[in-house]
Amino acid sequence: MAKALGIDYGTKRTGIAISDATQLIATCLDTIDTHKLDKYICKLINSENIDCFVIGYPVDLKNNKTDVTGHVKGFVKRLKNKYPNKKIYLIDERFTSKMAQKAIIESGIKKRKRREKSLVDKISATIILQDYLNLN
């Protein structure tokens, strides 16, 4: 079976997570600068058996678009054009950053490391991906 790629898209940084081949478990992979995202995904497509993309879809508490929603839509359009045979799933990403921060605190990671925003991004991507995997 193929793997799923979880993406927590941000205008500056993007968190990346990947599933196992059975698509049961999501694992943190990386946080990268968003301007390097397309090249990074291309390398992953070539090195891993990626079946689909699972992307966090940003909406507010009232289900309205946020400042980042348009950027995510543009990114999804680019993915569809570049990888027309790959499925793309959008997952509500509300509260994933708060859940990631809570998980970081509960894991016992030292305060200095907890301040790294890149850690929150990749854990958020993992939560988004795991939510998708739990539904399927």
Image (tube, grey):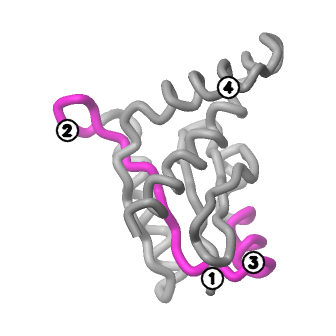
Which amino acid lies under the numbered mark 2 shown in the image of this protein? Answer: Asn
Give the Cα distance between marks 1 and 3.
Answer: 8 Å
Mark 1, Cα crowd under 10 Å, few <14 / some 14-19 / many 20+, is some
Residue position marked by numbered label 1 in the rendering: 2
Residue 104's disc is: 4
Q: Give the secondary structure at mark 4.
A: helix
Give the Cα distance between marks 4 and 2.
Answer: 27 Å
Mark 3, Cα crowd under 10 Å, few <14 / some 14-19 / many 20+, is some
Residue 80 position (above or below residue 57): below
Tell me, yes or no, whether the two marked residues, 4 and 1, touch with CB atoms within 8 Å: no
Tell me, yes or no, whether the two marked residues, 4 and 2, touch with CB atoms within 8 Å: no
**Image side of residue 83 versus residue 136, left or right:** right
Q: Nearer the viewer, mark 1 or mark 2?
A: 1
Which amino acid lies under the numbered mark 1 shown in the image of this protein? Answer: Ala
Task: Name the residue at 36% across, 41% down.
Answer: 58
Give the Cα distance between marks 1 and 2.
Answer: 32 Å
